Image: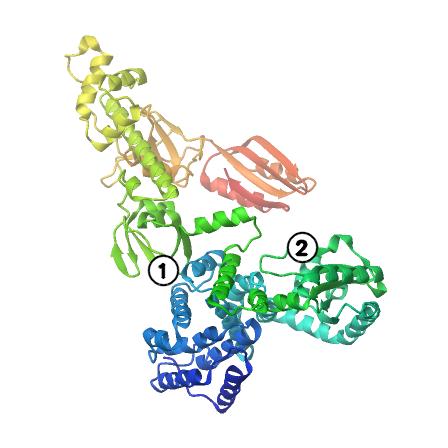
């Protein structure tokens, strides 16, 4: 049960301070009358117990207010977005309705709150966040891009709040989600200040010791770093002041701890060998028409003072980044032979760099509804094209995206499908085996058939049955090319399997009637019966639509035309062997002995069984029996595909004169004399004959095979143990 929301004195004091900021200090903040309405509805929700502390013990009211302040101060949006953040809690609690919000605050606020409610429903379905798919799903649900900005701000507030929490698991989970989704979003939108803080907090929560160590080292070197920055800046300031038409300011900043850590990993160097720990920023107060020329003029002055690295020049003046970022970056050799990054930009460019796309439009002045629409369209375009791409590629992806939907599994995994996809498409999208056994699904808790068309954001649990198999009609139900291809492949495999079973049935029936199977005669018979493909004939046999007795009669007539009306050989429906007289039970058992007569059998080469192994017999097409070990690699496949051809078998009394071929695979260290040691152990064993040895060396290791003749499994196991005991031998396995 959630804890009732009763604010402490500290929380009340913080709420009052935040109220002052929201109502008075933020440009475009909350109007006094609006705040009174919001306050009344929130207090009602708290009094009714509909707003409680979250799972981490935080006050949602306080969290919302901090998010609203962050949006107003750092992102700088209008009244609607801040009002929406505060009102969203009231709507969720039921103390304010959407219709009421629309009447009092207008369509814009209503639109944002509606979107926020939809996003919350997505989070309820997905406990885990996968960056690209989840981002695309958010965009497909989000009609107002300001919601994305609220999400970024809200997550940073939560990361800040967790600083004082003892819940280490919650911190790591939040940090993981921030790294997967919110930090990339903030980066793409140009909210570098928010991004940098989130990165540092994420590192602090996931790599606590690394963060603490880097923080300590930065603090220890702070004084010397500030002295160096001052010595670097002074000569540039002096030269710039000689240019009266250039108004400027210079500031030096230490790079974020996460940025330094990434450099250490990329360059594989310790902290002490990372020299570009800070950047110098020269910001020009320039008229729009003079921005580029004055930035290049400042670059020229810096390059005259310090030698630039020609490979480290980044010109985002001529071609700005997709998020609106403009700047000129160069890396120069400063005093003491240290590389220093210098960023040159105007006041307008700096505002965009610090506060993202919203600042870019705010700087131009978003005062009309059309201007706001242009801003939001620009944000959506940026988010939908997270990777750098050409205009043509961007347009193609946007058109393609319109025809996509995103579907949840019960565990919260997210899959992307084309619009119009059915339950069957989703099942095959997850796994071919799941698709082949699919009988329907639960969509948002409701039973639906295979042909049910999915909607964006549906949560789907596939229902399966082991007796279900793909049908030809499924090709008309599936809408995606992937699913149809998988269904066709499955149908082909089923047909092939049935054809094999049909052929095996025909061959076995002929053998049981003492009729030799001849491929050419059977082909002639199949053509004569009107089948164009052999597989179709055998499939009909497997399905039981052709009388097997009629096939036998027709085949014999073709094989022996002179005896067409003669008697049929006596039927022997199953291949039966005489059981060991001492063996009890209903099953017949083939007893393998030295002088076994009347049965054509051989030991399978794939597993080379020897006396003492657990074995079984397999009736081959030729009528003989192949003896396999029960742990043979082919055993499972034989038993599943041809259960009617499996017979039980066991060994008779041991004959000491019998020797069985065995292959041992051996791996070890390539030490001097190790091969002699192995052969010496084998030669000392009675009843063991070495037939061959094949050893290959690989650097310090060797591998090879030993070919032996041996009496039984007990002696073989003892020999393997002795070889394993030889120094340098790592592994001995039976082949």
**Residue 314 visible in the displayed image:** yes
* Mark before the other along the chain sequence, 2 or 1: 2
**Residue 673: x %, y % from top left:** 68, 39
Q: CA distance from mark 2 to mark 1?
A: 49 Å
In the image, residue 604 above or below residue 19: above
Residue 410 is tagged as 1
Task: Point out the image quarter for the N terminus.
Answer: bottom left
Which label was assigned to residue 607?
A: none
Secondary element at image label 1: loop
Local SS, label 2: loop
Q: Visible in this render: residue 649?
A: no
The tag on residue 318 is 2
Does the residue at mark 2 contact the one at mark 1 (Cβ under 8 Å)?
no
How many numbered marks appear? 2
Q: Bin the neighbour count of mark 1 within 10 Å (Cα to Cα): few under 14, some 14-19, many 20 and up.
A: some
| Left or right: 251, with 102 as reference point | right
Q: Nearer the viewer, residue 671 or 70?
A: 70
């Amino acid at each position: 049960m959630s804890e009732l929301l009763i604010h402490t004195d500290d929380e009340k004091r913080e709420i009052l301070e935040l109220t002052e900021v929201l109502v008075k200090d933020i440009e475009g903040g909350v109007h006094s009358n609006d705040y009174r309405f919001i306050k009344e509805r929130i207090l009602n929700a708290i009094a009714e117990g509909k707003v409680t502390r979250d799972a981490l013990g935080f006050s949602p009211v306080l969290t919302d207010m901090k998010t609203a302040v962050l949006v107003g101060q750092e992102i700088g949006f209008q009244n609607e977005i801040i009002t929406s953040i505060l009102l969203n809690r009231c709507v969720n609690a039921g103390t304010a309705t959407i219709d009421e919000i629309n009447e009092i605050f207008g369509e814009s606020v209503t639109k944002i709150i509606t979107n926020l409610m939809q996003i919350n429903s997505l989070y309820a379905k997905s406990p885990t966040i996968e960056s690209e798919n989840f981002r695309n799903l958010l965009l497909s649900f989000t009609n107002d891009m300001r919601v994305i900005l609220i999400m970024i701000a809200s997550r940073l507030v939560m990361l800040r709040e967790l600083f004082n929490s003892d819940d280490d698991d919650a911190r790591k989970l939040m940090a993981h989600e921030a790294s997967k989704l919110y930090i990339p979003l903030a980066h793409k939108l140009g909210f570098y200040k928010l991004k940098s803080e989130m990165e540092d907090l994420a590192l602090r929560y996931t790599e606590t010791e690394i963060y603490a160590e880097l923080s300590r080292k930065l603090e220890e070197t702070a004084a010397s770093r500030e002295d160096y920055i001052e010595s670097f800046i002074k000569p540039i300031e002096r030269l710039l002041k000689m240019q009266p038409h250039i108004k400027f300011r210079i500031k030096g900043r230490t790079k974020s701890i996460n940025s330094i850590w990434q450099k250490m990993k990329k360059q594989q160097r310790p902290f002490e060998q990372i020299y570009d720990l800070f950047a110098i920023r020269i910001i020009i107060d320039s008229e729009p028409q003079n921005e580029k020329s004055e930035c290049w003029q400042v670059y020229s002055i810096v390059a005259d003072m310090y030698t630039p690295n020609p490979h480290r020049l980044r010109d985002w003046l001529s071609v700005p980044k997709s998020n609106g970022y403009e700047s000129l970056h160069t890396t120069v050799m400063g005093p003491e032979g240290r590389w220093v990054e210098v960023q040159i930009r105007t006041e307008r460019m700096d505002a965009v760099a610090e506060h993202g796309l919203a600042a870019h439009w705010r700087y131009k002045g978003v005062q009309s509804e059309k201007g706001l629409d242009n801003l939001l369209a620009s944000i959506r375009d940026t988010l939908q094209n997270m990777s750098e791409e050409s205009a043509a590629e961007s347009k193609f992806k946007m058109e393609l995206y319109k025809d996509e939907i995103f579907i949840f599994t019960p565990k919260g995994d997210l899959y992307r499908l084309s619009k119009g996809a059915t339950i069957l498409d989703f099942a095959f999208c997850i796994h071919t085996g799941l698709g082949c056994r699919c009988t329907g699904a639960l969509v948002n808790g409701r039973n639906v058939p295979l042909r049910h068309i999915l909607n964006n954001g549906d949560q789907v649990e596939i229902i399966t049955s082991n007796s279900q198999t793909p049908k030809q009609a499924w090709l008309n139900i599936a809408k995606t090319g992937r699913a149809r291809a998988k269904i066709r492949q499955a149908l082909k495999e089923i047909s092939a399997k049935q054809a094999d079973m049909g052929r095996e049935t025909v061959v076995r029936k002929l053998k049981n009637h003492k009729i030799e199977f001849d491929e050419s005669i059977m082909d002639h018979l199949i053509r004569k019966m009107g089948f164009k493909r052999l597989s179709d004939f055998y499939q009909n046999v497997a399905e039981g639509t052709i009388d097997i007795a009629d096939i036998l009669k027709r085949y014999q007539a073709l094989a022996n035309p002179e005896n067409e009306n003669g008697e049929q050989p006596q039927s022997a429906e199953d291949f039966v062997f005489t059981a060991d007289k001492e063996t009890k039970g209903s099953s017949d058992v083939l007893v393998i002995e030295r002088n076994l007569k009347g049965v054509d059998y051989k030991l399978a080469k794939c597993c080379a069984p020897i006396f003492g192994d657990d074995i079984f017999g397999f009736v081959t097409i030729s009528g003989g029996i192949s003896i396999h070990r029960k742990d043979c690699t082919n055993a499972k496949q034989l038993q599943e595909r041809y259960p009617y051809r499996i017979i039980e078998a066991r060994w008779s009394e041991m004959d000491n004169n019998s020797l069985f071929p065995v292959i041992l695979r051996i791996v070890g260290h390539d030490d001097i004399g190790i091969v002699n040691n192995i052969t010496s152990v084998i030669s000392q064993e009675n009843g063991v004959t070495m037939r061959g040895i094949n050893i290959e060396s690989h650097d310090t290791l060797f591998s090879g095979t030993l070919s032996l003749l041996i009496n039984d499994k007990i002696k073989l196991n003892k020999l393997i143990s002795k070889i394993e005991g030889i120094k340098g031998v790592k592994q001995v396995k039976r082949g």
